[in-house]
Amino acid sequence: MDSSSAVIFNYSKASGLLGKAFIGKRTHLLFEKKTLGELWTLLFKTPSPEISEHLLARQIELEAQKRFVNQYIGFLRKWDNPPEILVDQLKLVQLRNIKLIYSALSKKEDELPYIVDLAEFSKLNVSAWPDLELITKDSEFSWCREVADIHNQQKIEYKMDLQFLKSWWDQIQKYRGDEKIVQEKFFIEEFSIKNIIWALRLWVYYDYPKEKIIENLLYVTDRADSRDPVAAPVFEILDKRIDNYSDWEKWKYAEYLNPVNKGESWKIDPVWFEKQYSLVKEHHALRIFHEQSMSNAAFVAWFKIKSFELNCIRRAVESIRLGVENEIS
């Protein structure tokens, strides 16, 4: 289809899919289910496979992600030439795919792990399994040609993260007008928050010193410092005390902090922060989807909304397996 026809057709389809999605007031339906079998039937409208709970949990996550990505690829295929800004949204899926491939090879597994098929939008030649050099050839991960010792896997994955971020950031700088503004805003906010959450986890759970936290940050320029778009917000909090609310109450993201309960000691909670931010992020994306209905920004927002839904499904799976309440509210 030509661009205008594709936008009209896809927006109508995307709106219908969001109406059936487990977002907003429908999110709680995921967390009402008591078994993984019930959750499977809610999501896929079929009886659950007769497999172990461990395998079923994994299968629910895989099927949910596959359905989401296939829906999005379906949109892209309606364009004669899909906008690059929309194709770029699949970069996160490709990053996950290469990490799964590398992990499987480092563990000397015989079979290709389950990865999400990006079809013609994939830059990875997965048919070349298990030849890593051929798999990554002509992709941004072409530098990854050999499998290092399993103990260095985290270091390699960190390098992949940086490569992915820098490649995407450089691509965004080539956009013009509203496309650049919207995508750059989404990018900076999303990965700044990921950096903050990662830093808080290292700080709160593992007592990492400031220098060690900085060494683990994501960045898109030459180094992780206060001038980098996605690392800078972390530098603003490194001198705060994690158990003193007054240090945080005027912070830019204070609305996402866990509350202070009278008579109880307070300590910043990374999990609470992440959940509260995800709700705001979903509402913001929904607003963009409706307000900018006939633009590429609407489909970027749709991708963010469905990513939120996927995370909710993963949490629902986790809460059922652990037997705990974990609803996002």
Image (tube, rainbow, N blue to C red):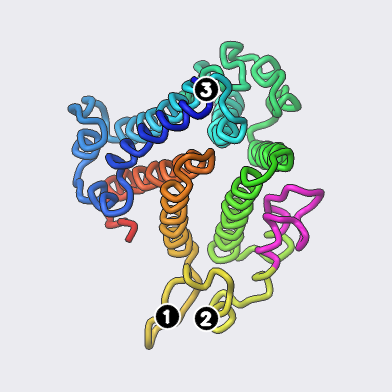
Q: Secondary structure at mark 1?
A: loop
Task: Please say if the residues under marks 2 and 3 sit with CB atoms less than 8 Å apart.
Answer: no
Q: Residues within 10 Å of mark 2 (few under 14, many from 20)?
A: some
Q: Quadrant of the C terminus?
A: bottom left
Bounds of the magenta segment: 214-235
* Residue 230, quarter of the rendered image: bottom right
Q: Residue at x 67, y 38 (%)?
A: 168
Relative placement, left or right, of 13 versus 246 is left
Q: Main secondary structure of the magenta part?
A: loop
Task: Please say if the residues under marks 3 and 1 sit with CB atoms less than 8 Å apart.
Answer: no
The three-letter code of the residue at mark 1 reads Val
Task: Please say if the residues under marks 1 and 2 sit with CB atoms less than 8 Å apart.
Answer: yes
The three-letter code of the residue at mark 3 reads Asp
Query: Closer to the N terminus: mark 2 or mark 3?
Result: 3
Q: Is label 3 or label 1 in front? A: 3
Q: Is residue 226 magenta?
A: yes
Residue pointed to by mark 2: 245
Q: Nearer the viewer, residue 51 or 184?
A: 184
Query: Mark number for residue 147?
Result: none
